[in-house]
Amino acid sequence: MTAATASHTPPDLVEGARLTVDGVELRVRVSGRRKRFALTVEPDAEVVLHVPAGRPFMDAERFVREHRTWLASKIALRVETMPLSPAKRLVEGEVFRYLGRTYRLAIDRNAPAGSAVRLVAGRLVITTEQAQNPAVGRAALIDWYCRAGQAWARGRLQPWAARLWVAEPAVGVSDLGGRWGTYNRGRKGDSASGLMSLGWPLFQLPMHLVDYVIAHELAHVRINGHGADYWRILRSALPECDERRGELNELGRRMWMGGIA
Ligand SMILES: [Zn+2]
């Protein structure tokens, strides 16, 4: 393609097409139901241009230019908060974190296949089978974080529940797909005070940040959403909640999320 054709033939707005407008790269998504253009910035900072069917490139270009300032600030924010989660290798000495402390991996060649991961004398011990099979090793380590995290969190709920004037919900630790915690109050009329779910990667963080997430979810027992009332309640129990939230965002994106190298 020559420079002349490149500058004179506007690209078609088809599903999956990649465009560049003033140096910003965009991926096109076409929807027949859509009436207007829209822009979204994905968590990995990719920019998606949502396009109504049958519109020319010129319209899209104008729309992107009109929203250039908004787009630039949104992209900057995404880049700043993008996950930096490192992958781990299942080898002797690899470093794992639990409640802010580091533990090195040890491979126990005598452990029977199918043994659960254990924390022994400051080392996280896995079996040869777990070390050699990434899927098995990953699942076994995540299972350990779930068990250890759940036992630790159970003992931590009571003081925070008391400070927030709420009844303790049940607590479970699992894979929440990148979220640190959720609270589900259950069906109307349930006598129990709902379920707090915590994501296993949370337990790599220092205790005061796990506490922040526990307090955050407990405040949701009293109030849904993140309006001014919500933050007032959380701040009354945890005055430094803003600093903790900032620290969680910053440190959190450096935690292991289950990737095996
Ligand atoms: Zn929340």
Image: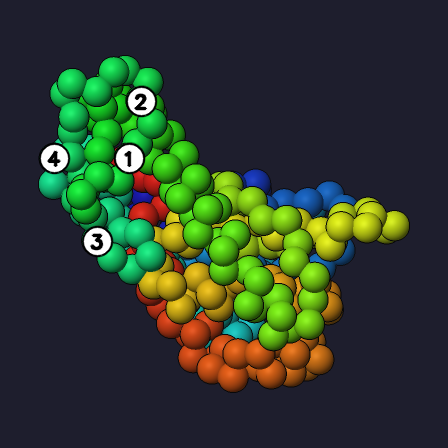
Q: Which residue is mark 2?
A: 115
Alpha carbon distance from label 1 to label 4: 14 Å
Vertical side of 156 occupied by 229: above or below: below
Point 16% across, 18% down: residue = 110
Point 23% across, 29% down: residue = 126
For the residue carrying disc 1, how many other residues have a C-alpha within 10 Å: few (<14), some (14-19), or many (20+)? Answer: some
Frontmost of labels 3 and 1 is: 1
The three-letter code of the residue at mark 1 reads Arg
- Secondary structure beneath label 3: strand
Frontmost of labels 4 and 2 is: 2
Mark 4–mark 3 CB contact (< 8 Å):
no
Point 22% across, 39% down: residue = 120
Mark 4 or mark 3: which comes first in sequence?
4
Point 34% across, 63% down: residue = 206
For the question of whether residue 145 can be seen, the reply is yes
Mark 3 or mark 1: which comes first in sequence?
3
Mark 2–mark 1 CB contact (< 8 Å):
yes
Q: Which residue is mark 3?
A: 102
Q: Position of residue 127 (x, y in %)?
A: 22, 24
Vertical side of 261 occupied by 78: above or below: below
Locate the N terminus by quadrant: top left
Seen in the image, is 158 located left or right of residue 141?
right
The three-letter code of the residue at mark 2 reads Ser
- Secondary structure beneath label 2: loop
